Image (spheres, helix red, strand yellow):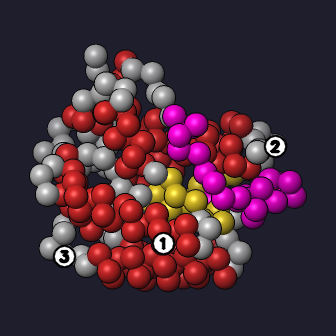
Amino acid sequence: MPAAQKTCDTHSDLFNFVHELPRFAESLKKQRKIKVVAIGSSSTAGESDVVPYPERLAMLLREHYRDHMIDVLNHGIGGQEATTELLRFEPDVLAEAPALVIWQVGTNAVFRKDEFDFGEVIAAIKMGLNRLLERSIDVVVMDSQYVPAVVNGEKLKLSEELVGKIGQAANAVRVNVFRRFELMRHWVTQDGLSIGELVREGDEKMLHMSDWATNCVSRALFESIRGRVEA
């Protein structure tokens, strides 16, 4: 059965957030206009004709919180990683003064493993998280997607290693991790989707997510945010 025909199961009971989002929650109580910044690489920026998650998340947030004007600013640039994204934090993130930042990291460090050093990637993530927390900005770290380009062969071990280190860096400062890698793996190992169904049709790199996967990831992220704010 094509993924498009399958029901989106976000498994919110397994992948819920564990830390509070105080700035975002307070903004919902006191502000009508709320700003969220999404920074990352191509699965943030968007690829081909697949609408990326920031635009989908904005629609879900606006539909649910109807009394607010919630903007999700898309500051994704394809091919980047935490080390390069950190360099544009001032203009693309901090200058926006958002209530919430969603930082998507990890994929390109594995996909182009010869170009990135894991130690430098984790150091950049730690530095970025500290800068955001110093401004009292809520943060969600989104880890890698589970697609053939980063899980085939030796890359599976590399992805698992980096995803683990990303989680450790975030948890050390009480920042939520949106565990995209494990959620997508769950769809394959437990829900019966083939991994190919998670990849955009025609993507020879087998890297970018399909419309169905992007939509379900967006909904899972929304439910995680809503569940933590309304807990």
Name the residue rendered at 58%, 37% in the picture. 13
Numbered label attached to residue 151: none
Per the image, label 2 sits on a secondary structure element best described as: loop
The answer to whether residue 79 is visible is no
Q: Is residue 104 magenta?
A: no
* Quarter placement of the N terminus: top left
Residue in the picture at 31% in, 33% down: 189
Quadrant where the C terminus is found in the figure: top right
Q: Which numbered tag is attached to residue 67? A: 2
Instruction: State the image quarter where residue 32 is shown.
Output: bottom right
Q: Nearer the viewer, mark 3 or mark 2?
A: 3
Q: Are marks 1 and 3 in contact (CB under 8 Å)?
A: no
Disc nearer the start of the sequence (1/3) = 3
The label number, if any, that marks residue 169 in the structure image? 1
Question: In the rendered view, does 60 fall on the left or right side of 88?
Answer: right
> Depth-wise, is mark 1 or mark 3 nearer the camera?
1
Q: Which mark is residue 115?
A: 3
User: On the rendered structure, is 137 left or right of 210?
Assistant: right
Which amino acid, by three-letter code, is at mark 3? Glu
Residue 176 position (above or below residue 209) = below
Disc 3 residue crowd, few under 14, some 14–19, many 20+, Cα 10 Å: few
Residue 36's spot in the image, x, y percent?
62, 60
Image: magenta residue range: 11-39
> Label 1 to label 3, Cα distance in Å?
21 Å
**Quarter of image, res 118:** bottom left
